[in-house]
Image (tube, helix red, strand yellow):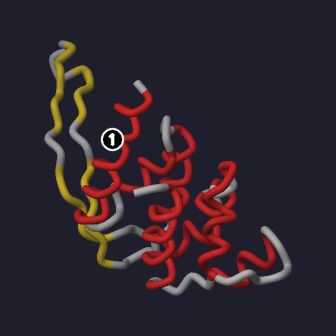
């Protein structure tokens, strides 16, 4: 999957939840509407897609509160102090989350901003088939560069 196809998948999910792409594009990118395909091509070029993925309007609909969503939370290991004052290692297994909490889009925007690759962060929230296509294409792209 190239950047445009990833954006198309992300946009599909947000528009399914109520996001209106055309008015957003005209307000934030260009006042004239070139069509959805041309608009996505324009956003995919030169890294302009950051305008869309970090937009509050897009984030509100992409991670709409209370909606049924399936995404994986990665496993993690961290240290904490137990009741006896000993430092212990806690290992959490990866798990699936099913629904969003109100205002969760703000949290995800912060996490996406801190991530190495914001698109990779967003791919976690797509359906498994779209995620597999994107990761396979990314691996192929990385091996071609090496």
* Residue at the spot 44% in from the left edge and 30% down from the top edge: 145
Q: Quadrant of residue 78?
A: top left
Q: Nearer the viewer, residue 113 or 87?
A: 113
* Residue at the spot 29% in from the left edge and 58% down from the top edge: 133
Q: Nearer the viewer, residue 27 or 130?
A: 130
Q: Is residue 35 left or right of residue 119?
A: right
Q: Nearer the viewer, residue 73 or 19?
A: 19
Q: Quadrant of residue 96?
A: bottom left
Q: Is residue 119 above or below residue 62?
A: above
* Image coords of residue 113 (percent x, y): 57, 44
Q: Nearer the viewer, residue 52 or 56?
A: 52
Q: Residues within 10 Å of mark 1 (few under 14, many from 20)?
A: few
Q: Circle 1 sits on which residue?
A: 140
Quadrant of the frame with the N terminus: bottom left
* Residue at the spot 53% in from the left edge and 62% down from the top edge: 4
* Residue at the spot 35% in from the left edge and 61% down from the top edge: 125
* Image coords of residue 115 (percent x, y): 49, 39
Q: Check disc 1 and report its element: helix, strand or loop.
A: helix
* Image coords of residue 24 (percent x, y): 71, 77
């Amino acid at each position: 999957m190239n950047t445009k196809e990833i954006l198309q998948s992300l946009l599909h999910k947000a528009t399914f939840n109520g996001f209106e792409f055309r008015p957003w594009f005209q307000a934030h990118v260009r006042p004239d509407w070139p069509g959805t395909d041309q608009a996505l091509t324009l956003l995919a070029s030169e890294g302009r897609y950051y305008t869309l993925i970090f937009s509050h309007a897009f984030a509100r609909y992409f991670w709409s509160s209370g909606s049924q969503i399936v995404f994986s939370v990665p496993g993690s290991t961290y240290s904490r102090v137990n009741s006896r004052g000993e430092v212990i290692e806690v290992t959490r297994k990866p798990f699936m989350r099913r629904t969003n909490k109100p205002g969760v889009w703000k949290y995800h925007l912060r996490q996406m901003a801190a991530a190495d690759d914001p698109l990779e962060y967003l791919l976690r929230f797509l359906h498994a088939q779209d995620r597999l296509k994107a990761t396979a294409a990314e691996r192929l792209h990385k091996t071609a560069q090496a």
